[in-house]
């Protein structure tokens, strides 16, 4: 029985900061951000958007024509949780008017949790092949103003419909996993921004790739040459370039020209370059970018996926692109979303960044900005109150 991704939708907020603007404000050579990190823009979340509004907006187009009525499980992967107890997905379930005969759970392990959600969804489908599972991944990457992590911020959400008749990508059964107790990036409960040992985190990312590849190779009997395109977890696009060249060397493929290796990942990088890191959504934003942007027909091709979550847990796995997939991608909608965004000045970005919701239960009407069809309208008595827009 096949299991895999039947439909994919990406959402990122309506505002962005140009990294040349950020570099000027921080007194840094803009090539460091644009060439050294490989980033162009950074998506910025206004105060009335959060992981819930982003995820609901990403999911909305996948639920038309009665699909919503067939969803019996929602997994919500995030490390930007809004509550220590209540799952963020319950708000999404309500905003999208999904059936009450449905279970909703939130998963956390840094950027890796979306892959855990996808794999659990595939396993559940083998028990109950008729069901449809909605996997949501939504995050806001946040470091301190003026820190080295600042240009690697970003935000966005992915919605994936996971079924036994996947029209986009069949997920193959074999994986390589890896876990190690490392402090490369974390966010204690009392902090709004991540704490990060940046250079160490890039080293752990690369060593985790080698460990998971070894496991994947052993489990699947496949080699580097059996994989046509690669999608990596994308904290910034240059990380994928480094990772892919290292993997080629490690697997004895260093004779391949740089252009060939770069072409194997290039299409997966477009969206991340203009949104930045969206943590749990990031790998699947890369997959969306690959399917949307590839000029080559990928039908029947194997895509390798490397998922990394700091702390750390990683997995290398693969999927096969399905016949007719181009009829089911949402390329036009994603491109329009990105091209319609509003550019912020550095002061406007800092004002959004510095906005805080009340922490004492007092009431606040959240200032209205451009959003998708859902917004956080108000907080009252420690409750978040969402609104449908338009
Ligand atoms: P930094 O230390 O300020 O940057 O921060 P740098 O000095 O390492 O420079 C970056 C690159 O730009 C270097 O390239 C420089 O040479 C180059 P490299 O040597 O690495 O190839 N450079 C220039 N290039 C052209 N012209 C110039 C110029 N100047 C320098 N003028 C760092 C970089 C990534 C450490 C920082 O941004 C950071 O801490 N980011 C957050 C952590 C992160 O993204 N880690 C990635 C791996 S961990 C991960 O992916 C998990 C994560 O998503 C979280 C989760 O799992 O939940 C983060």
Image: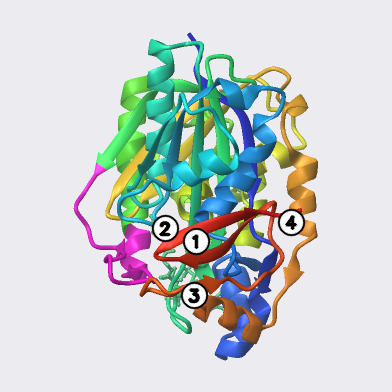
Helix, strand or loop at label 2? It is loop
Q: Which residue is mark 2?
A: 80
- Between 220 and 190, the one nearer to me in the picture: 190
Relative image position of residue 116 (x, y in whole percent): 37, 36
**Going from the N terminus, do you reach mark 1 or mark 2 first?**
2
Q: Which residue is mark 1?
A: 140
Looking at the image, residue 326 sits to the left or right of residue 375; the answer is right
Q: Residues within 10 Å of mark 4 (few under 14, many from 20)?
A: some
Helix, strand or loop at label 4? It is helix
Q: Which residue is mark 3?
A: 150
Q: Nearer the viewer, mark 4 or mark 3?
A: 4
**Rounded to the nearest whole Å, what is the CA distance between mark 4 and mark 3?**
21 Å
- Image point 75% across, 63% down: which residue? 341
> Is the residue 210 above or below the residue 359 in the image?
above
**Going from the N terminus, do you reach mark 3 or mark 1 first?**
1
Q: Which residues are magenta?
A: 179-203
Relative image position of residue 190 (x, y in whole percent): 28, 71
Image quadrant in which you'd find residue 80 = bottom left
Evaluate if marks 3 and 1 touch, with contact meaning CB atoms under 8 Å apart: no
């Amino acid at each position: 029985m096949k299991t895999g991704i039947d439909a994919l939708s990406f959402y990122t907020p309506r505002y962005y900061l140009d990294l040349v603007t950020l570099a000027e404000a921080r007194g840094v050579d803009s090539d460091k951000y644009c060439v050294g990190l490989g980033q162009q823009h950074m998506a910025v979340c206004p105060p009335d958007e959060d992981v819930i509004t982003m995820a609901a907006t990403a999911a909305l187009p996948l639920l038309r024509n009665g699909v919503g009525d067939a969803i019996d499980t929602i997994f919500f992967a995030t490390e930007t949780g809004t509550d220590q107890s209540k799952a963020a997905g319950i708000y999404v379930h309500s905003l999208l008017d999904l059936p009450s005969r449905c279970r909703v759970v939130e998963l956390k392990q840094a950027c890796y949790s979306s892959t855990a959600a996808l794999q659990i969804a595939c396993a559940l489908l083998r028990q109950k092949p008729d069901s449809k599972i909605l996997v949501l991944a939504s995050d806001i990457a946040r470091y301190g103003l003026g820190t080295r992590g600042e240009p690697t911020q970003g935000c966005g959400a992915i919605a994936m419909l996971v079924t036994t008749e996947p029209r986009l990508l069949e997920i193959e059964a074999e994986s390589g996993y890896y876990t190690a107790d490392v402090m490369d990036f974390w966010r204690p409960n009392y902090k709004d921004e991540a704490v990060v040992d940046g250079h160490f985190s890039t080293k752990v990312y690369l060593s985790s790739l080698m460990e998971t590849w070894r496991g994947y190779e052993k489990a699947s009997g496949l080699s580097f040459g059996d994989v046509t395109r690669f999608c990596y977890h994308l904290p910034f696009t240059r990380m994928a370039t480094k990772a892919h060249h290292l993997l080629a060397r490690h697997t004895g493929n260093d004779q391949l020209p740089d252009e060939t290796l770069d072409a194997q990942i290039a299409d997966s990088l477009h969206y991340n370059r203009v949104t930045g890191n969206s943590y749990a959504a990031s790998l699947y934003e890369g997959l969306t970018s690959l399917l949307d942007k590839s000029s080559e027909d990928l039908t029947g091709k194997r895509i390798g996926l490397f998922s990394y979550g700091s702390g750390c847990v990683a997995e290398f796995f693969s999927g096969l692109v399905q016949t007719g997939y181009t009829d089911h991608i949402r390329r036009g909608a994603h491109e329009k979303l990105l091209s319609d965004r509003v550019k912020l000045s550095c002061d406007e970005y800092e004002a959004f960044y510095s906005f805080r919701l009340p922490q004492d239960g007092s009431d606040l009407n959240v200032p209205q900005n451009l959003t998708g069809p859902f917004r956080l309208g108000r907080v009252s008595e420690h409750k978040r109150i969402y609104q449908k827009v338009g």
